[in-house]
Amino acid sequence: MQKELKQLLENCTLCPHQCRVNRLQGKRGFCRAGALASVYGYHLHQGEEPPISGCSGSGTIFFSRCNSRCVYCQNYTFSQLGQGKECSLEKLAQAMLSLQAQGAHNINLVSPTHFVPQIIGALELAKAEGLNIPLVYNTMAYDAVPTLKLLENLVDIYLADMRYADDKLALEYSSLPNFTQVNQAAIKEMYRQVGNLKITNGLAQRGLLVRLLVLPNRISGTKKLMQFLAKELSVEVSFSLMSQYYPTYLAKDMPLLARQINQPEWKEVVAAASDLGLENGWIQDQPTEFERNKFLGVNFNQVE
């Protein structure tokens, strides 16, 4: 890893939590990540949006730890409880190359924010050995703009969440201070770098795709988020309107989050997208029953 990238871990300000801990000396901040990248597993994933998964699947690498603490996270065993293995830059690079060899349409980095220096280092190694498929940065988008700038010309596709329109709710349910300002600034920077989503032969090649997970009781404020996209970016921005929320982890015991969304809530946001002129997107069918964690039963490749 380049010296400048290592220095970012000596006084960690990679994300807006600005913990300033020395991860190279074993100190742990909000995300609890250390000096090495930690990976839960990797595999060809068919469950992303159609231009991301395609026919062969998205080469998805699931990092352990996260810089948010969503009370409803379906991946909490590795995002919050830390399941996974630390790995060297060489092993992370080999995971990328293995996914490409399996036919992945892209390399999809899930919850990558806290490991940006390690990812950049591994990419350098992987590209030297022939990695040549698009790179997807799959993020909650609680990202610091200076960190995103390090990724310019490295990331091809930003797959980014806009989860809350209310700072109080973002803090209560995901432990994310000042979320709306941070999130909107990050989305604008991503859009500046890659622009609207460009699709060739059904597969995304470059651009921004914004995910909007609809939460019950209008907690996500999805209509306001779509207004931001239409007014501050473009009505041509690509979006994914998601109805898949189900109460898991701590949310099962929280009254406002202890159910799936209902038909009126879903119809409201679908109508709002149309009213705002947002047409470049994917609208998920509303589930009729609780969905199990989509990763159960998947055979992950493990880093050794």
Image: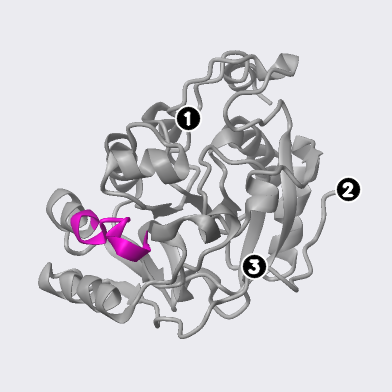
Instruction: For marks 2 and 1, give the CA distance.
Output: 28 Å
Mark in the foreground, 2 or 1 = 1
Identify which amino acid the numbered label 3 is placed on. Answer: Ala
Where disc 2 sits, the SS reads loop
Identify which amino acid the numbered label 2 is placed on. Answer: Glu
Instruction: For marks 3 and 2, give the CA distance.
Output: 21 Å
Mark 1 vs 3: CB contact within 8 A? no
Residue at the disc numbered 2: 304
Relative to residue 302, is residue 266 drawn left or right?
left
Residue at the disc numbered 1: 15
Q: Which residues are magenta?
A: 212-225
Where disc 1 sits, the SS reads loop
Q: 10 Å neighbourhood of mark 1: few (<14), some, or many (≥20)?
A: many
Q: Point out residue 45 in the picture as x, y percentages from the top left corner.
A: 63, 69
Relative to residue 143, is residue 31 drawn left or right?
right
Q: 10 Å neighbourhood of mark 3: few (<14), some, or many (≥20)?
A: many
- Mark 3 vs 2, N-terminal side: 3
Q: Residue 106 or 272: which is nearer the viewer? A: 272
Residue in view at x 47 percent, y 55 percent: 254
Q: Quadrant of residue 80?
A: top right
Residue in view at x 69 percent, y 49 percent: 78
Q: Point out residue 232 in the picture as x, y percentages from the top left corner.
A: 16, 48
Q: Residue 108, relative to residue 91: is it above or below? A: below
Identify which amino acid the numbered label 1 is placed on. Answer: Cys
Which mark identifies residue 104? 3
Instruction: For marks 1 and 3, give the CA distance.
Output: 29 Å
Mark in the foreground, 3 or 2 = 2
